[in-house]
Image: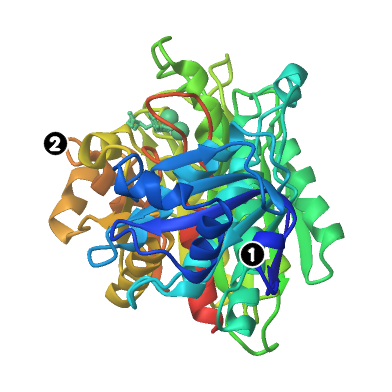
């Protein structure tokens, strides 16, 4: 999709397939909407007066086949009550707009962008969200179901008419598309089945990024090299699998040479059977999504390279497949991590932390300004927070606050849980330096406690995306979260 800012003499003469008119609950029309109303012989005013359209958040009404306009159709789009408008409301309204548009055949959309949002929902941000969400709405999974592409009519072009503050707005709409594309990359990787999206598939996608962007260079370590580094914990997870584990490093250099990099680490379990601690059969197919943390790293790297952000970012992916087999790791086995700490694997289904701990130790060498890991780590996070917020745990209050704020600003929210010392007691064992599961509840916290022991030397945060990385309950599909949060976080650092 491409986006343009246009300032036509008259909105009514602008030619496109469909014209969107944003209308707030106060039903006051912008100039563009008033002009359109006049050309439509007051049809819009009549609908508003009759209460047939009220400008409620996300409400849409299609006026098909209108005359006297440059566009074939008009869609009224409710933006809610201005006074109480929050960013999350706007994101949700954009979502609903995108859904309504996907039911039309419109390829070139025009939108009256001469509306005024309240201060706490800045105009340029609001335009960026429209770009992101309409780009997001163009996504369909088609790799193994070609017929899903049939009758599909993606939006190819969107023209923002009469937006104020042109330079800012222009920047916002192009960045919005870059973020939307990044989200869709993450969704597509997540949606791919485990027999296609293997650890090697992830590394080939990472190499592709390195070829596509001059500022990204990719390096991949196989099992032999990981063995030489002493990544015994990561390697123990892929033992039972025929697929070779991969350790992927993507370096994006957009900032000064001397600027410390920000590191993103993704859990890339391309399928999680649970291993010898086998998961029950129901919904086990969803464990193809267990690489969504890795997918969010790839999507975010793509977005930030497209946006050309002036910072240094390193994306790291720990990829493996967790399978039961004769040579698979067994409960009670003790493995040695790259940090030298021994780990008793009490449950082979707590494998995410086993791959992440070696990645977290590895990234120390970059002297990072911050490290954020993303992982579909614990079912307990779904119990705690459901599907609206990702879990956030951190050893640094300022980093945690930055990420929480980025979550609110992007409509991709997180909520913080503590990692107090008292919880660390739960992962002690007589047989090793630490156990990979903790008795006594708080599963999301004890998992983060485990990780924190490998992230002591830098500002670190962990996002548990078990509840947010894919749509639960259906319709089945990866959500692309937390790409939007990460992009917002990196944009703020870069500005
Ligand atoms: N990938 C799962 C976590 C998960 C489960 C994410 C369901 C989304 C939906 C993870 O590897 C796992 O199996 N965690 C275990 C940990 C337990 C054994 C301590 C869990 O949450 O049950
Ligand atoms: Mn597991
Ligand atoms: Zn897992």
Identify the residue at the far front of this view.
41
> What residue appears at the point 57 percent right and 61 percent down from the top-left corner?
362
Camera-nearest residue between 260 and 212:
212
The residue that disc 2 covers is 440
Answer yes or no: is residue 78 visible.
Answer: yes
**Dot 1: what SS?**
helix
- Name above or below for residue 381 compared with residue 86: above
- Name above or below for residue 272 compared with residue 162: above
Marks 1 and 2 sit apart, C-alpha to C-alpha, by 63 Å
Ligand 1, what quadrant?
A: top left
Does label 1 or label 2 sit earlier along the sequence?
1
- x and y percent of residue 451 in the render? 38, 54
Camera-nearest residue between 222 and 37:
37
- x and y percent of residue 340 in the render? 47, 56
Camera-nearest residue between 380 and 45:
45
The residue that disc 1 covers is 11
Nearer the observer, disc 1 or disc 2?
1
Q: How is the image coloured?
A: rainbow
Distance from mark 2 CB to nearest ligand 1 atom below 8 Å: no
Numbered circle sitting on residue 430: none
**Dot 2: what SS?**
loop
> What residue appears at the point 54 percent right and 39 percent down from the top-left corner?
63
- Disc 1 packing (10 Å; few <14; some 14–19; many ≥20): many
Answer yes or no: is residue 190 visible.
Answer: no
- x and y percent of residue 49 in the render? 31, 49
> What residue appears at the point 29 percent right and 35 percent down from the top-left corner?
382
- Disc 2 packing (10 Å; few <14; some 14–19; many ≥20): few
Quick check: 461 left or right of 75? left
Q: Image quadrant of residue 346?
A: top left
């Amino acid at each position: 999709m491409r986006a343009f800012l246009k300032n036509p003499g008259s909105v009514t003469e602008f030619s496109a397939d469909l014209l969107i008119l944003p209308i707030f609950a106060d039903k006051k029309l912008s100039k563009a909407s008033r002009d359109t109303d006049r050309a439509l012989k007051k049809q819009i005013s009549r609908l508003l007066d009759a209460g047939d359209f009220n400008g409620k958040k996300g409400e849409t009404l299609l006026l098909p086949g209108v005359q006297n306009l440059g566009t074939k159709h008009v869609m009224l789009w409710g933006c809610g009550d201005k006074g109480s408008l929050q960013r999350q409301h706007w994101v949700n309204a954009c979502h609903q707009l995108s859904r309504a548009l996907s039911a039309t055949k419109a390829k070139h959309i025009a939108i009256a962008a001469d509306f005024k949002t309240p201060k706490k929902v800045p105009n340029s941000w609001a335009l960026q969200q429209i770009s992101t969400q309409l780009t997001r709405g163009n996504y369909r999974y088609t790799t193994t179901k070609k017929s899903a592409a049939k009758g599909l009519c993606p939006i190819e072009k969107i023209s923002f008419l009469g937006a104020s503050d042109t330079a800012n707005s222009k920047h916002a709409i192009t960045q919005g598309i870059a973020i939307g594309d990044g989200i869709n990359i993450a969704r597509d990787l997540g949606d791919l089945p485990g027999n296609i999206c293997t650890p090697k598939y992830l590394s080939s996608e990472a190499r592709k990024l390195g070829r596509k962007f001059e500022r990204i260079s990719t390096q991949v370590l196989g099992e032999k090299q990981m063995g030489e580094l002493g990544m015994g914990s990561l390697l123990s997870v892929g033992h039972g699998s025929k697929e070779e584990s991969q350790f992927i490093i993507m370096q994006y250099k957009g900032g000064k040479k001397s600027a410390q990099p920000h590191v993103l680490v993704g859990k890339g379990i391309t399928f999680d059977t649970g291993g010898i601690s086998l998961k029950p059969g129901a919904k086990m197919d969803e464990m193809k999504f267990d690489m969504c943390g890795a997918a969010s790293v790839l999507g975010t790297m793509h977005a930030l390279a497209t946006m050309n952000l002036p910072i240094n970012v390193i994306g790291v992916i720990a990829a493996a497949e967790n399978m039961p087999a004769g040579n698979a790791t067994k409960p009670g086995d003790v493995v040695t991590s790259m940090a030298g700490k021994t780990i008793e694997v009490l449950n082979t289904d707590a494998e995410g932390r086993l791959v992440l701990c070696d990645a977290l130790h590895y990234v120390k060498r970059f002297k990072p300004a911050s490290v954020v890991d993303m992982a579909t780590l614990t079912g307990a996070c779904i119990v705690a927070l459901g599907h609206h917020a990702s879990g956030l745990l951190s050893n640094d209050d300022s980093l945690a606050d930055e990420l929480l704020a980025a979550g609110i600003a992007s409509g991709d929210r997180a909520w913080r849980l503590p990692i107090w010392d008292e919880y660390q007691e739960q992962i002690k064992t007589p047989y090793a330096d630490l156990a990979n599961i903790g008795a006594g509840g708080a599963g999301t916290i004890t998992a983060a406690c485990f990780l924190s022991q490998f992230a002591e030397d830098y500002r670190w945060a962990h996002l548990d995306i078990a509840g947010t990385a894919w749509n639960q309950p259906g319709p089945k599909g990866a959500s692309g979260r937390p790409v939007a949060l990460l992009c917002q976080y990196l944009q703020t650092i870069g500005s």
